[in-house]
Amino acid sequence: MPVRAVRGATQLEKDDRQQMLDRVSEMVTSVMEANELEVDDFISVIFTATSDLHSEFPAYAARQLGFGEVPLICARELEITGSMPRVIRMMAHVETELDRGDITHVYLHGAAALRSDLTRVRSVPDE
């Protein structure tokens, strides 16, 4: 089975633990739905968070979704002048029959602006 990487990102309105869990869960679930993936298809997931987020580990939300046996790691995003605040990104390595060009990367809320160059982006506006 081919191994592919799939990306996702979301933005929080504020550094709030429940919003962190909700938004990360939404991002992971959306990546799974968009690419017809199950938890068993995941090899590993890397989460990054901007330095203004401290309320919870993003990986904890994935564990609550059943990712207990999938290797997960959290890291700090680079601090680049002018970069978008309160962003959580993910890069997952998955087993899938999808061709690389058919992978759907999911950018939610304000993070949709991060990769406007991708045509296969699902965005969710802030409410």
Image (cartoon, rainbow, N blue to C red):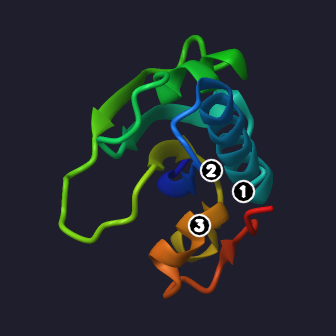
Mark 3 or mark 1: name the one nearer the start of the chain: 1
Identify which amino acid the numbered label 3 is placed on.
Answer: Gly
Label 3 and label 2: CA atoms lie apart by: 28 Å
Q: Quadrant of residue 120 in the image?
A: bottom right
Q: Residue at x 69, y 35 (%)?
A: 25
Q: Secondary structure at mark 1?
A: loop
Q: Residue furthest top?
A: 68
Q: Position of residue 4 (x, y in %)?
A: 48, 54
Residue ID for mark 1 = 35
Q: Residues within 10 Å of mark 3 (few under 14, many from 20)?
A: many
Label 3 and label 1: CA atoms lie apart by: 21 Å
Which is in the foreground here, disc 1 or disc 2? 1
Identify which amino acid the numbered label 1 is placed on.
Answer: Asn
Q: Is residue 19 left or right of residue 4?
A: right
Residue ID for mark 2 = 96
CB contact under 8 Å: marks 1 and 2: yes
Which quarter shows the C terminus?
bottom right
Q: Is residue 78 left or right of residue 42?
A: left
Between 13 and 110, the one lying in front of the other is: 13
* Vertical placement of residue 111 versus 101, above or below: above
Q: Secondary structure at mark 2?
A: loop
Q: Residue at x 53, y 56 (%)?
A: 9
